[in-house]
Amino acid sequence: MRALILGGTSDAGRLADAIARARMDAIYSYAGRTQDPAAQALPTRIGGFGGMSGLADFIRRERISHVIDATHPFAAEMSRNAVAACAATGTALIALERPPWTRISGDNWIDVADIGAAVAALPEQPACVFLAIGRQHLAPFSVKPQHAYTLRLVDPPDRPLPLPRTDLIVSRGPFTLADDRELMRSRDIGYVVARNAGGSGARAKLDAARELGLPVIMIARPDLPERLRVDSIDDVLAWLGHDARLGA
Ligand code: NAP
């Protein structure tokens, strides 16, 4: 058994810890997006594989028997490549995927299918907008330059931002309710734009928006091909053949 973890999330880091404790043979893979990626408890590689065929070559070369897709739920290209490369090489695949957030009483969510629909859902009259969507999908919002956008990014941007009026916060989660309430109050935020990532590290903005009665434009997860999915690290370990109840 030799596993490949497609990582880049806090869940993937916790999985790497558990696999290392279980003394299983595994490699952790980062895309290489952040400047200072967290050290992992497993041998680590960084950078794209070169599409589906590059990943299939890597799987064969490294004699990978099990692939665990623990990428962010919006990392759709990597997830699609994993499905195709595992099918092409006859490799077992599982996705470690946090459940999406669901609305609770008091939430004022506007559900949209994608980034384009999120842009369309913003009003025409100027507003202060908290764009909590990372740095890769900012450009579509440039068609609504009348808004003042607050951005929160993990790293300082390495090129000019595509939006004219931005207030940039560089910070790595997890974020607390008090942090996000203060962020929204102090900037007079009128709309929050979020992607339905799930998990606890980025959920505070939803709780703060509810408290402040703010609408959240909630972008749905991308559609992905069918694959085996679990939401707990113990389930991944069991799938790998290690009984988590035995301890590490
Ligand atoms: P993406 O659009 O699905 O992936 C684009 C390309 O990046 C992939 O085709 C692949 O390149 C490479 N890549 C992605 N994840 C990789 C990994 N774990 N190891 C090696 N190469 C990888 O993904 P994305 O949205 O740009 O996200 C990039 C990474 O950041 C992911 O690993 C994800 O877990 C992490 N992340 C993303 C978000 C987010 O908001 N999307 C949030 C937190 C963390 P090749 O085709 O060359 O193999």
Image (spheres, rainbow, N blue to C red):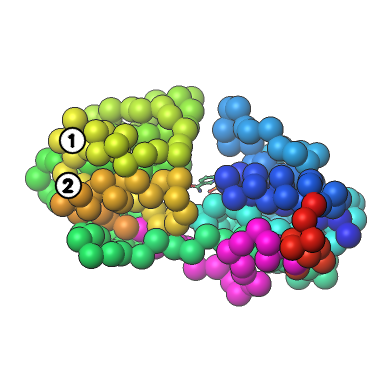
Looking at the image, is 66 positioned above or below residue 12? Answer: below
Mark 2 belongs to which amino acid? Leu
Quarter holding residue 238: bottom right
Residue 226, percent from left and from top: 60, 74
Residue 16, percent from left and from top: 71, 47
Q: Is residue 71 magenta?
A: no
Write the residue at 39% across / 61% down: 101
* Dot 1 alpha-carbon crowd within 10 angstroms: few under 14, some 14 to 19, many 20 or more: few
* Dot 2 alpha-carbon crowd within 10 angstroms: few under 14, some 14 to 19, many 20 or more: some
Q: Are the residues tagged 2 and 1 within 8 Å (C-beta)?
A: yes
Q: Nearer the viewer, residue 57 or 27?
A: 27
- Left or right: 52 in relation to 230: right
- Residue where numbered disc 2 is placed: 212
Write the residue at 24% across / 33% down: 182
- Residue where numbered disc 1 is placed: 185
Looking at the image, is 186 positioned above or below residue 117? Answer: above
Name, please, the residue furthest toward the front: 246
Q: Is residue 230 magenta?
A: yes
Write the residue at 34% across / 51% down: 194
Quarter holding residue 232: bottom right
- Left or right: 83 in relation to 110: right
Write the residue at 58% across / 46% down: 9
Looking at the image, is 234 positioned above or below residue 5? Answer: below
Residue 195, percent from left and from top: 39, 53
Mark 1 belongs to which amino acid? Arg
Q: Earlier in the sequence, mark 2 or mark 1?
A: 1
Q: Nearer the viewer, residue 248 or 171?
A: 248
Looking at the image, is 91 positioned above or below residue 44? Answer: below
The segment highlighted magenta reads 219-238
Residue 211, percent from left and from top: 20, 49
- Measure the C-alpha gap from mark 2 to mark 1: 8 Å
